[in-house]
Amino acid sequence: MTTTTATNSQTNASVIIRNEQSSDYQRVEDLTRAAFYNLYMPGCVEHYLVHVMRGTKDFIEPLDLVIELAGQVIGSIMYTRAWLTDDAGNVKPILTFGPLAVDPAFQRQGYGKMLIEASFNIARALGEDTVVIFGMPANYVARGFKCCRDLNVSLPDGSYPAAMMVKTLRPEVLGDRHWHYAESPVMAIAVADAEAFDNQLPAMAKHWQPSQEEFNIISRATITVLAE
């Protein structure tokens, strides 16, 4: 069990970062739903992903963390196993995280940053050295994530999504090789299954907002490599 007491430099509030416990499950799913609802689509799927990923073979339990303020869980980060394969077929186990969620009442106050940095420290102690994620770059470049093209990490089809970013926890771990990224099958959830799960919960209003179009643009964008 990992438990860390830290002070938020933005708010000067004392928080506890610890491993998620079964008693936290409902709270974490609820805050994840609140954090993502209507953000990338009308409704969301992330709370369903949280619900199904725990206990799967690729779930990394030591990196299943919550942040607690005044006895209340206000945020969560979860990791699963992923893989990089170079052009010679060598496979390198790595990490990906998501969902990373902070209760809307506590967003933009540094709590997500604290969860990310705490998880990086634990990952290093576990001997992990690389994290690949998909997300809005503006949210993650300050945490040291780089463009996937700059570190020569592509999808299996050779494309470089603009939303795919790489963080190395130790210097030069990827060398000068070309790597193909693959994530756990648990990440490939069906929207219909997520909607059926959501329909069992207290109703929330689905609506359009501009962040959905921003996500639509970045999720379809790829990085073009120009000939030198």
Image: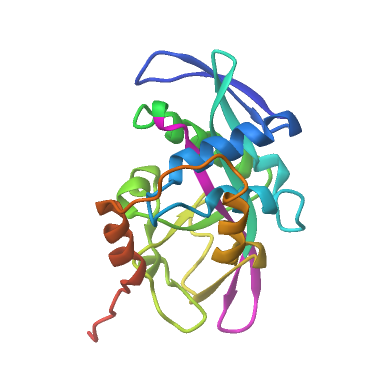
Magenta segment's dominant SS is strand
Q: Which residues are magenta?
A: 83-104
Query: Residue 52, image x and y in percent?
Result: 69, 53
- The quarter of the rendered structure image containing the N terminus is top right
Query: Residue 77, image x and y in percent?
Result: 56, 41
Magenta run includes residue 95:
yes
Magenta run includes residue 111:
no
Q: Quadrant of residue 29?
A: top right
Look at 51% across and 65% down and name the residue there.
174
**Camera-nearest residue between 170 and 17:** 17
Look at 37% across and 17% down and name the residue there.
11
Q: Quadrant of residue 159?
A: bottom left
Q: Is residue 75 above or below residue 86?
A: above
**Camera-nearest residue between 214 and 92:** 214
Left or right for 225, reference 53 = left
**Camera-nearest residue between 228 and 6:** 6
Q: Is residue 4 above or below residue 198?
A: above
Look at 25% across and 53% down and name the residue there.
210
Left or right for 208, reference 79 = left
Query: Residue 89, image x and y in percent?
Result: 64, 82
Look at 51% across and 42% down and name the residue there.
203
